[in-house]
Amino acid sequence: MKSTANPVTIPEEALLSLLSKFKKTKISVLGDVGIDRYTHGTVERISPEAPVPIVFVQSESLKLGLAANVADNIIALGGKAELTGVVGRDKDAQDLSALLKEKRLSVQSLVVDGSRRTILKERIVAETQQVLRVDYENTHALSSQVQKNVLDEVLKSIKTSDALIIEDYAKGLLSESMMKTVIAAANKKKIPVLVDPHLKTPAHWYAGATLLTPNKKEAEALAGQKILDEKSLIEVGQKIIKMTKSVSLIITLGKEGMAIFKGAKAKPILIPTFAREVYDVSGAGDTVISVLALSLATGAKLEEAAFVSNLAAGVEVSKRGTATVSPEEIVQAYLSSR
């Protein structure tokens, strides 16, 4: 697909000015939270018990995952984040709390639910190849009391925030009524509402959002149509905006960059990717929505916000696992792209 408009860019001074404003910006983040555990090792032989590799473990590390990674990205970019989610009453919750405090993130808005376990995703990696991923999680809906507690926390957070990010992982945290309430509260405060949607969630749950940021697969699921070329891309984008009544839409297209839709009738603006080397795409969407939220909260135009987030995504995918990006790295990527 070729760009339908002149390449989107901004002057260096404007980029530096925008990034400097991130320090004064606070983002409220609502979504499932968890831990990413990376187990690294080597493979020297196949198990005699089954045709699977035996991984000799050399190191283990823990990172913030899911919506917690989004909050971590915001902090790394210089902004402030208030994270609302649900954890269990277990060791993983303690590890998550320690990681959040290490990253200067508050744990005050995390709600404890004894009926759930804290989400943990373990990736077993041999050399540079992921061999296996193991997910530990519960996905049942929240009880009415826990849902009320979550709602109270996020509504309190919205009152002092400059934008709201909703991370939908379809793991039982979000409900249609909760989405409706928090989006309405953010709209009343006149702050941007950015939603990272899930392909299993009905599109109308996102009604009233300022911006949706689905990847290609999620966009196809929401619209019920495959993206095969520019024509079908336009059809999918316009369908999603009409169904969700969202103000705008950005579909991330992997190596083909991203498509920006401003309204249901406008043709998309296509921005090519800035990634020079793709090592690991996990977490790229978290980086994109974090930069978009910070940029829009400071008054940047959608095209400018998308341009900067695309630069940041190009940096993130060159790193191993879920990772954060600094303003300095964004500036370096900008200079390298010219």
Image (tube, rainbow, N blue to C red):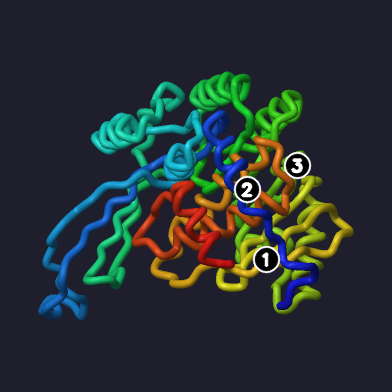
Give the residue type at disc 2.
Glu
Which residue in the protein does label 2 denote? 13
Q: What is the spatial separation of the Cα atoms under label 1 and label 3, in whole angstroms?
A: 26 Å
Q: x%, y% of residue 127? A: 22, 71
Number of the label disc, if any, that sits on residue 271 = 1
Circle 3 residues within 10 Å: few <14, some 14–19, many ≥20: some
Q: What is the spatial separation of the Cα atoms under label 1 and label 2, in whole angstroms?
A: 21 Å
From the image, which quarter does the C terminus lie in? bottom right
- Residue 276 located left or right of residue 264: left
Mark 2 element type? helix
Q: Nearer the viewer, mark 3 or mark 2?
A: 2
Indicate whether 72 appears above or below 160. below
Q: Residue at x 62, y 20 (%)?
A: 159
Q: Residue at x 56, y 52 (%)?
A: 288
Q: Which residue is most to the right?
A: 265
Earlier sequence position, callout 3 versus callout 2: 2
Indicate whether 330 appears above or below 155. below
Give the residue type at disc 3.
Ala
Which residue in the protein does label 3 denote? 207
Viewer-closest of 120 and 285: 285
3 and 2 marks in contact (CB < 8 Å): no
Mark 1 element type? strand
Mark 3 element type? loop
Indicate whether 294 appears above or below 8. above
Viewer-closest of 284 and 296: 296
- Residue 293 located left or right of residue 231: left
